[in-house]
Amino acid sequence: MRIALEHLTKKFGHVVGVEDVSLDIRDGEFVAFLGPSGCGKTTTLLMVAGIYRPTAGIIRFGDRVMNQVAPKDRNIGMVFQSYALYPHMTVFGNIAYPLKLKKVPKQEQIARVQAVADKMGIGDLLDRRPGQLSGGQQQRVALGRALVKQPDVLLFDEPLSNLDARLRLVMRAEIKHLQKELGITSIYVTHDQVEAMTMADRIAVIQNGRLQAFDTPDDLYDRPKTLFIAGFVGNPPMNFVDVEIEQANGAYYAVSPALRVEVPPDRGAAAAAHGGRVVMGIRPEDITIDPTGAVRGRVFVVEPLGRDDLLDVELDAHTRLHVLADPKLKVGAGDPVLLKLDTQKVQFFDAATERSLLWQ
Amino acid sequence: MATATPQHEPYMGSPADDLAFERISTGELVFQAVYSALVTVMLLEIGVIVFRVLEPLVHHAPALFGSGATIDETFTRTIGNALMTLAPFLAYAVAGHKMKPLASVNRARALGAALAAAAIVFVLVTMGQYVFRIGPFAERPSLEMTLRQTDAGILVEEVVSGGTADRAGIRPGDRITAIRRVEVTLAELNTAVRQSKVGDVIRLRVERGDEEEQFPVEVAATMEIRPAALVAGLVIALLFAAVAVFWPGGWTPYALLIAIMLPLAVGYLWLIIATFSFRTEGLLPVNAQGEVGGLTLRNWEFLWREATGSNPSIWRVTLNTLVIATAMMAIVLLVSSMAGYALSRMNFPGRRTFLSLTLILHGFPAVTLLIAIFFVLRNIGNIPVLGDYFGFNTRGGIALVMVAFELPLGVWLMKGFFDGIPWDIERSALIDGASRWRTFYEILLPQIRPGLLALGIFAFISGWGAYLIPQTYSIGTKTATLAVYINQLTSDTAPVNWNEIAAVGLFQMLPVFLLFIFAQEYLLNIYAGGTKGSS
C-alpha cells in the first residue's frame, strides 16, 4: 500500500504539532520517522492511524483520500511503546480482538491467532494475561495483535523503548525480518537514530514539526542537507567548527583560530563560493591521533566506550573536538595530542540558514 | 506497565545506618512530642471508656462472683484514675520509642533525644492537665480546711480563708466529732467527703470550747497542687522514655492498634448485647429488678409486628430502603461512568466549568437545598404519569434527589479512574476496529471495574443509610426508610425503648456489615484513589 502525505499540518489550538509535511512512502517500504522528543513524529503517525484529524493537508492510502476514514476502516496495525495490551483479556483474547470485531468466524479466529502466535514465538502463552508476561513477551503479543488482521499498513510508535538493550537488538532484527518477509508498508517512529539507521529503507527526519529530510540512511549520514541532520544522525555526533575558507595555490584551506586544514578542492570550492564564515562539520571517526598531525590540542575528558575511547580534545578556549581513539594509546586527561583530520568527508554549512553548502 | 528489566538495587544499608539519623532537629523533636501528646489524649479517652464499661461489672460483683465478694465502690474509681494516670506515661514511652532508630547508631544521643522529647511531652501533658483540671490538678471534693486526728475528735488546724469551711463559720481550734449524729474518725470523714458531690451539704457537729453546734458545710471543689507529685511524674516520664529507647521493638504497633481498637470493639459488643437485654449496665444485661440477667427477645419483636396506622411493617420499610439504595446504585454507576469518561477523554466547551461546579456541588450541604428541592419535587409531581413515580412522597423522587447528591462524588471518582488508563489502550482498540462506544464498554469499563464496584457499594450504602432526604420528602409511612423508621421509634409519646432502637439499628447494619466484609478491598480503592486494574 502506497502512502502519501501532502502538506500535512496539525495544530492543537495555537500550538503547531506538525507543519506542512509532505512525503511519499512506496508500497512495502519501511520508513522511519526520526527526531527528538516532542518533534511531531508521533503526531504524524497518529494522523496516519486516524486518531488525530489533520488540521490541513491530505493523507492518501494508494489513491484513496483517508482524512475522513475512521481508524477501524483503515486496516492498519499499530504497536505502541506501552504495548497497550488489554489487561483484562488473555493473550488469545488480545490477539483475537481485531478478528472478533471483524466478525471472523470463531474457528478461523482460533487458527489465525495460533498461526500468528507461533510465528511470534508465543504460541504457548495464549492462556496467560498480559500482567503475567515479561516486557519482551508483551511486545510480541502487541506485534501479533497488529499482524493478525493482515493489515495494509503497520505503524510502530517507539515499540522498543521499554525493552532492555539486549532484547532491543533481538526484536530489532525480528521486526525488520518480519517486515521484509510480509512486505507490509511500515512506518516506524523512533528517537533512536541507531534504530532508524539499521531498520529503515528511508528515514524522515523531523524537527519542530517540520520535515528536515527524507533520505536513505547512507545519504543522511554522508550527505546531510542541514546542520540539524548532520548533528542528529551519527553517534558520537559530528564536530562543528566555525571556519573561513582560504584559497592558496589551487588548494583550499579551512581556517579558524584553532586550526588550519586542507580540504578537498571540490568541497572547498563549494564552500568558498558561499564566502565568509561557514560551519565545518567533521565526524569523530575521521579524526585520528597522529604524531604527524597538524592540529594541536589537549585532552579534556576521556570517555572509554570499550572498543574505542571517546576523547574530548580542547584546541582553544572556544573549540573542542570529539575524537575516537584507540584505547591502546592510553591517552589521559590533560595530555597534549596532535590530531590529523581526514577531510575527505568534511561537510560545510551556511552558519545562518544551517543548510548544507554541498548538497541540496 | 513498567519494564520487566530485572534491576539490582545497590545496597543502601538500613535507614538506621543513614547519617541523617545522627542528628535530630528541634522541629523533629517537637513534632514527635506533639504526636505523643495526641496519643496521650487518645489513650485518656480509651481509659474513660474502658472505665465506664468496667464500672457496672464491679458493681455487680456479688451477683457474678458469689455474694461473699464485695468490692468497695471506690475501687472502680481507682481503676479509672489509674488508667487516666497511666495514659500519659504511655505517651512518654511513645516519645522514647520514636528515638529507637537513632539508638542503633548512637545510644547516648538517642537517650538524650528521648529524654528531651519526654520532657517536652511532660510539659505539654501537664499544661493539658492544668487546663482540664485532671491528673495532679484534679478538683476534688473538699471542705477546704486542714484536719488532724486527736483523741478528742478531729482538730481543725487551719481553715482556708474565704473557703467553704470559713464561710460556714468553722474556726481553727474547733473539734469535729460527728456528721449529724454519727461519730466519725478523720478517715471516715475523708471518705464521706470524697464520695460526696460538689454542692452537697455535710452537717458537721463541732465542739468549740464547751459548746456543741452543727455547721452545715457545702462541699467545694478544690484543686490541690502537690509539687512532689509533679516532680515524681517528671522522673517517671524520663524513666519511661529511657526504657522505651532500648525496648525490643516489633509488637509495639500492634499493642497500640489493639488498645485503640478495643473501645470500638467493645462498643459493637455492647450494641449486640443491648439488643437481647431488658436493660444494660455497661456490658451486663440487667432485668427490671436491677439484677444481672434479663436476656430477652422482646427488642426484636418489630420483625413480626403487624403494621398499624402509624407504624409500618419493618419489611415494607426494608423494601423501600432496598429499592432506593439499589436504584441509587444503578443510576449513580450509569451516569457517573459515562460522565466520567466524557470528562476524562473528551474536550468540549465548558468542561472545566462543569468540573469545578460539580466540585462545589459536592461541598454543598444538602440541608440548605431542602426547601428548593421540595418545590422541584412538587412540580415534578404535577407532571402526569412521571409525577406518580418521581414526585414528592415517592420512592423514585427520593432516589432521584439522593442520586443528585451522590453524583458529584461519583463523577469525579470515575473521571479519576479513567484518567488512570493510558490513552494508548483506547487508541489501540480504535485501530483494532472498535467503535468509540464499544471501546468504552468492552475495553475501558473492565479496567475500572474495581472503581465501579467501589462506587456502587458506596452509593448503595449511602442509599441504605439515607435519613435526611427520605425523612423530609416522605409523608407518613409509605416511603419511610430504615433510618426514618428508627427515628419514629423515638418520636412516640410512649417511653423510648432504647434497646429496641439498638435492635433495629443492628438489623439495618447487618447488610452493610456484610458488604464491607466482602468489599473492603474495593472500598480501599476509593480512599486510595488508585487504579489497580491497569497493571
Image (tube, coloured by chain):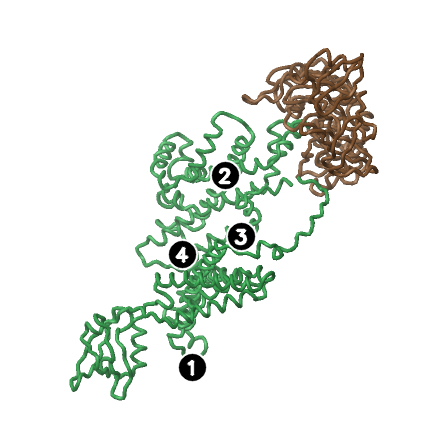
| Label 3 crowd (10 A; few <14 / some 14-19 / many >=20) | few
> Which mark is in front, 2 or 4?
2
Report whether mark 2 lies on the same chain as mark 3: yes
For label 4, the crowd category at 10 Å Cα-Cα, with few meaning under 14, some 14 to 19 and many 20 or more, is: many
**What residue is shown with label 1?**
B68
Question: Tags 1 and 4 in contact by the CB under 8 Å rule?
Answer: no
User: In this view of the protein, can residue B56 be seen by the observer?
Assistant: no
Q: CA distance from mark 1 to mark 2?
A: 62 Å
Tell me the brown chain.
A
* Residue A176 at x, y percent in the picture: 80, 28
The amino acid on which the numbered mark 3 sits, given as a three-letter code, is Leu
Q: Tell me the SS state at disc 2.
A: helix
Q: Dot 3: what SS? A: helix
Write down the chain letter for disc 2: B
Horizontal side of A169 relative to B386 (left or right) equals: right
Which chain is green in the rendering? B
Q: Name which residue lies at 57% across and 66% down.
A: B246
Quick one: B194 or B9, which is closer to the camera? B9
Residue A266 appears at what percent x and percent y? 79, 13
Between the C-alphas of marks 2 and 3, the distance is 22 Å
Vertical relation: B58 (above or below) B22: below
For marks 2 and 4, the one nearer the N-term is: 2
Q: Which residue is mark 2?
A: B410
- Which residue position holds label 4? B501
Circle 1 or circle 4, nearest the eye = 1
Dot 1 and dot 2 residues touching (CB under 8 Å):
no
Same chain under badges 1 and 3? The reply is yes
User: What residue is disc 3 on?
Assistant: B514
Name which quarter of the figure residue B290 lies in: bottom left
Of labels 1 and 3, earlier in sequence is 1
